[in-house]
Amino acid sequence: MHKSLIFPVSLLALVAAGSGASAMQGERLTSQYTRIDEACVESQLPDEPVYEAVCPGHGGWRVHIVSGEHGSASAYARPGIDRSDYINAPTRGLFGGFHDVVEWRLDDGEAFATIHRYVHYNTPDVMEFYDGIEAPNTLIVTALAAEGGYTVCPVAFVDASVLPEANMIARAAADELARGWDCGNEPIRFNEAMPDVETYFLSLGRKRAG
């Protein structure tokens, strides 16, 4: 990863959004924010990927980011928990990198999920292959307390380029789906066809709680 693949907060404004969880959950669910910045321990790697950053997160968690020529991937670890597998954003561009702010969703102060924005970038000659969008944005929702044989895995990819309430959808996915998420399942893709968590529950024949 080259340092230029970390996008500063000044380029991508964070939008404050409410939780989609029930009122009772909402009283104890909060967010904490950490940054991919000078506090990270950086190293050059001998091959592809070419760069690694290990950054402090919330409550002893660490965020690992590796990057190569065309993009980045992230993983998580904490004392007593080995580093997870690296999580890649869906392919929506020729290049890409992470926003420099990680949102941690907390239940009574304990982190159970993260939301991290990934910015894809397309040169004009390839935009037609990626819906004609120069810089698609994806919010990656990652479970930190999942089931199915893993602790950490992706829960959802939220298309922030087409969904105006993407931040709210990502929080709802984190709050309502991340805890106990089965890592054997494919991440949910929220987009125009699946525009919110309620639609996802309806697709399963279930009613959304709360």
Image: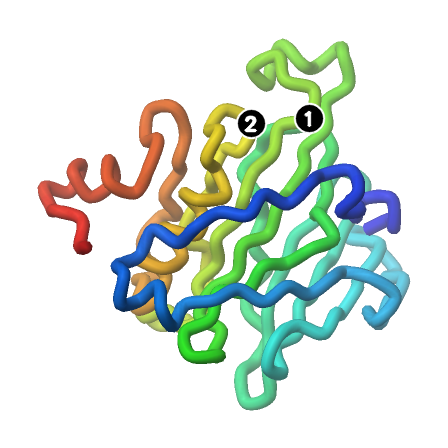
Residue 88, relative to residue 184: is it above or below?
above
Residue denoted by label 2? 161
**Can residue 124 be seen by looking at this rendering?**
yes
Residue denoted by label 1? 135
Kind of residue sitting beneath label 2: Ser
Q: Residue at x 74, y 33 (%)?
A: 95
Distance in Å between CA atoms under marks 2 and 1:
8 Å
Horizontal side of 81 relative to 28 (left or right) equals right
Horizontal side of 160 relative to 53 (left or right) equals left
Q: Residue at x 24, y 35 (%)?
A: 199
Q: Residues within 10 Å of mark 1 (few under 14, many from 20)?
A: many
- Callout 2: SS: loop
Kind of residue sitting beneath label 1: Ala
Q: Residue at x 9, y 41 (%)?
A: 205
Q: Position of residue 34 (x, y in %)?
A: 68, 65
**Can residue 152 be seen by looking at this rendering?**
no
Q: Name the mark on residue 56.
A: none
In the image, 199 versus 22, the foreground residue is 22
Horizontal side of 14 relative to 71 (left or right) equals left
Q: Residue at x 60, y 14 (%)?
A: 129
Q: Position of residue 103 (x, y in %)?
A: 58, 59
Tag 2 and tag 1, C-beta contact below 8 Å: yes
**Occupied quadrant, residue 75:** bottom right
Mark toward the start of the polypeptide (2 vs 1): 1
**Occupied quadrant, residue 47:** bottom right
In the image, 127 versus 102, the foreground residue is 102
Assign the C terminus to one quadrant of the image. bottom left
